[in-house]
Image (spheres, grey):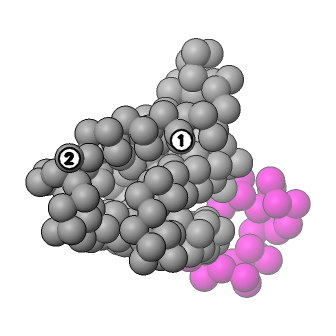
């Protein structure tokens, strides 16, 4: 994953991958049909690592706004903190217009937006939130976490590098909920 994250799909050769793994290219191709299937396996693994923790269904059923938004922000931030190379990998995939970036988007991002938009719409119907574009709010909320991690892990800005994940998540949640409340 580190090679793909540093050089992109096009810039990473199977020879480099085999060298880094300490195996022959022949063994690499015995395990993975081609470079694309290896790349796909990496993405599948990364998607499975956050699992369902990203979707606070119980908190949503209780209408616990704080817990819903806090869980999403904290899980996202912690995941990116643990493994910033995956974010770099996704940036490369998107820039290269690689179809595997689309796989992640469809498998994870669309599902997250759908969950959060649905929750916001439900709370609007219950009159707990003022009428807003749920799709825009969901994307904005997720975008705050992504942008924070881009600043600290990809661009290396010191100001955002040393902030505690819980404090960052709490700030994003507070800002969002204050904007949504009636």
Q: Can you tell which mark lies on residue 182?
A: 2
Pointer 1 or 2: first along the chain? 1
Residue lying furthest right in this view? 22
Horizontal and vertical percent position of residue 174 = 42, 38
Quadrant position of residue 44: bottom right
Residue under pointer 1:
169
* Real-space CA distance between mark 1 and mark 2, rounded to the nearest whole angstrom: 22 Å
- Residue sitting at x 64%, y 26%: 163
Q: Pick the residue in front: 92 or 168.
A: 168
- Residue sitting at x 11%, y 54%: 131
Q: Is residue 53 visible?
A: yes
User: Which secondary structure lies at badge 2?
Assistant: loop
Q: Which residues are magenta?
A: 14-38
Q: Quadrant of the N terminus?
A: bottom right
> Does residue 67 belong to the magenta stretch?
no
Task: Tell me the chief SS of the magenta region.
Answer: helix
Q: Pick the residue in front: 107 or 132.
A: 132
Local crowd size for mark 2, using a 10 Å CA cut-off: few (<14), some (14–19), many (≥20)? few
Left or right of 9, for residue 32: right
Quadrant position of residue 164: top right
> Does residue 31 belong to the magenta stretch?
yes
Local crowd size for mark 1, using a 10 Å CA cut-off: few (<14), some (14–19), many (≥20)? many
Horizontal and vertical percent position of residue 103 = 40, 71
Q: Pick the residue in front: 62 or 72.
A: 62
User: Which secondary structure lies at badge 1?
Assistant: helix
Horizontal and vertical percent position of residue 38 = 61, 71
Q: Is residue 96 visible?
A: no
Residue 84, compared with residue 66, is above or below; it is: above
Left or right of 29, for residue 131: left
Left or right of 1, for residue 88: left
- Residue sitting at x 32%, y 39%: 178
């Amino acid at each position: 994953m580190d090679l793909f994250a540093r050089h992109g799909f096009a810039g990473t050769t199977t020879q480099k991958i085999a060298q880094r793994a300490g195996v022959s290219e022949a063994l690499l191709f015995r395990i993975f049909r081609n470079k694309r299937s290896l790349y796909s396996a990496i993405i599948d693994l990364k998607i499975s690592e956050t699992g369902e923790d990203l979707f606070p269904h119980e908190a949503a059923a209780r209408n616990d706004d704080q817990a819903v938004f806090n869980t999403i922000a904290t899980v996202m931030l912690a995941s990116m903190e643990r493994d910033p190379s995956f974010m770099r990998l996704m940036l490369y995939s998107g820039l290269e217009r690689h179809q595997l970036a689309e796989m992640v988007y469809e498998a994870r991002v669309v599902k997250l937006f759908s969950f959060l938009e649905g929750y916001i719409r439900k709370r609007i119907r219950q009159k707990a939130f003022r009428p807003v574009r749920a799709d825009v709010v969901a994307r904005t909320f997720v975008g705050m976490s992504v942008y924070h991690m881009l600043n600290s892990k990809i661009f290396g800005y010191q100001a955002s590098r040393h902030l505690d994940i819980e404090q960052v998540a709490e700030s994003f949640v507070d800002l969002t909920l204050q904007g949504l409340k009636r």
